[in-house]
Image: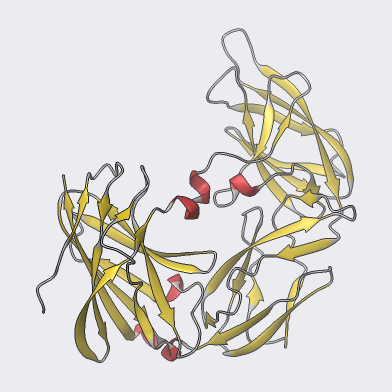
């Protein structure tokens, strides 16, 4: 193996710094390692969960509020009006106490908005029909007594479902998962919140892509691409923007390596783990959302770990430092029966 030019990552605590990664590339079955510089950039645009935000409905007594909870797109949720046929998880929050424990949660109109369950500071609501409902909540408060409040919420019937096709002209791999942002709106154009309602299907029907209705992220729809390659069109009973999916087998991938850096130094944002944009392509198109088929192994687990991710059309390798020293990661693209189709490696030096 050729001697590697190693990158230096100053500060394991990820204070602002500069470094460049070095990639070793081979394409199976003939191992042939080629040095490549990797484009490293801050993960902040990809970390929706790390961004504070989320839509909040205030209580009538200003003691408690209910805030929509979502692990991935919380900062993008701007409406507390719920979509009929969906569920939503909300967190009870108060400026009077940092950590709350709900004692009770009741709906004034269960036929409109039902309280499914509550635990700790979370309450799960089910939007049964269009209308208005008041959620009366009681939480364990300071020494002076419990906190009590009433939160008004609305349920509206979805009239449209807009999907953001982040992958555009890219293609997908069989037996994979793809998450795309979506927005539900009522007849007046107001955005609606909720998960579990996806009036979508694919043409042709049968083996191929399908909608995963078990996802619990507000503002996100998940597709399973299935085991059949081909071209599919998305259909809906609601007015949805046209969308098509081209699905290919993993053995159609011809490019599997890190993106080239545009310069010797790339700035990192404070408080984020560095990531590397990763090129995964067929002969003519980029592959979208490939983490199901990519295996990342740390050859130096005491120093660093890695994981493959995808966000809005970009595949990336995240590097998480654990200690100073040499960091080496092996990245494999898996095919049928987990056979390795392509393999790349990444090495960098983590410095104090």
Q: Is residue 324 left or right of residue 96?
A: left
Of residues 25 and 149, which is closer to you in this image? 25
Q: Position of residue 47 (x, y in %)?
A: 48, 51
Q: Position of residue 194 (x, y in %)?
A: 72, 51
Q: Is residue 7 left or right of residue 94?
A: left
Quarter of the figure with the C terminus? top left
Q: Position of residue 196 (x, y in %)?
A: 70, 58
Q: Position of residue 110 (x, y in %)?
A: 84, 41
What's the colour scheme? secondary structure
Residue at image x 40%, y 85%? 335
**341 relative to 137, above or below:** below
Q: Is residue 239 left or right of residue 34?
A: right
Q: Total number of numbered labels?
A: 0
Residue at image x 25%, y 92%? 29
Q: Is residue 282 left or right of residue 156?
A: left
Q: Which residue is most to the top? A: 144
Of residues 308 and 277, which is closer to you in this image? 277
**39 relative to 157, above or below:** below
Residue at image x 61%, y 75%? 168
Of residues 46 and 101, which is closer to you in this image? 46
Quarter of the figure with the N terminus? bottom left
Of residues 326 and 143, which is closer to you in this image? 326
Residue at image x 62%, y 54%? 217
**Residue 199's quadrant in the figure?**
bottom right
């Amino acid at each position: 193996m050729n001697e590697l030019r190693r990158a230096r990552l100053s500060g394991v605590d990820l204070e602002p710094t500069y470094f460049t990664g070095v990639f070793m590339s081979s394409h199976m079955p003939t191992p042939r390692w080629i040095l490549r510089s990797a484009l490293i950039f801050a993960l902040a645009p990809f970390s929706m969960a790390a961004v504070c935000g989320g839509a909040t409905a205030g209580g009538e007594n200003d003691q408690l509020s209910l805030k929509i909870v979502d692990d991935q797109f919380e900062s993008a949720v701007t409406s507390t009006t719920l979509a009929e046929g969906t569920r939503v998880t909300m967190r009870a929050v108060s400026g009077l106490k940092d950590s709350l424990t709900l004692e009770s949660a009741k709906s004034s109109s269960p036929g409109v908005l039902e309280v499914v369950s509550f635990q700790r500071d979370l309450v799960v609501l089910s939007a049964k029909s269009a209308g208005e409902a008041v959620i009366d909540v009681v939480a364990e408060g300071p020494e002076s007594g419990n906190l009590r409040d009433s939160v008004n919420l609305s349920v509206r019937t979805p009239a449209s479902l807009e999907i953001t096709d982040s992958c555009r002209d890219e293609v997908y791999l069989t037996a994979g998962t793809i998450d795309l942002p979506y927005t539900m709106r009522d007849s007046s154009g107001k955005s609606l919140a909720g998960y579990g309602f996806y009036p979508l299907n694919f043409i042709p029907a049968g083996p191929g892509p399908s909608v995963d209705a078990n996802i619990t992220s507000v503002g996100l729809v998940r597709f399973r691409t299935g085991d059949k390659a081909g071209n599919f069109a998305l259909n809906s009973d609601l007015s949805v923007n046209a969308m098509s999916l081209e699905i290919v087998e993993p053995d159609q991938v011809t490019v599997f390596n890190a993106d080239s850096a545009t310069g010797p130094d790339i700035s990192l944002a404070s408080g984020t783990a560095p990531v590397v944009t990763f090129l995964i392509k067929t002969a003519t198109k980029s592959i979208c959302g490939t983490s199901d088929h990519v295996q990342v192994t740390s050859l130096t687990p005491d120093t660093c770990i890695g994981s493959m991710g995808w966000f809005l059309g970009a595949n990336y390798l995240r590097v998480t430092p654990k200690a100073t020293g040499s960091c080496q990661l092996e990245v494999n693209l898996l095919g049928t029966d987990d056979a390795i189709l392509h393999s790349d490696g990444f090495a960098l030096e983590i410095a104090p």
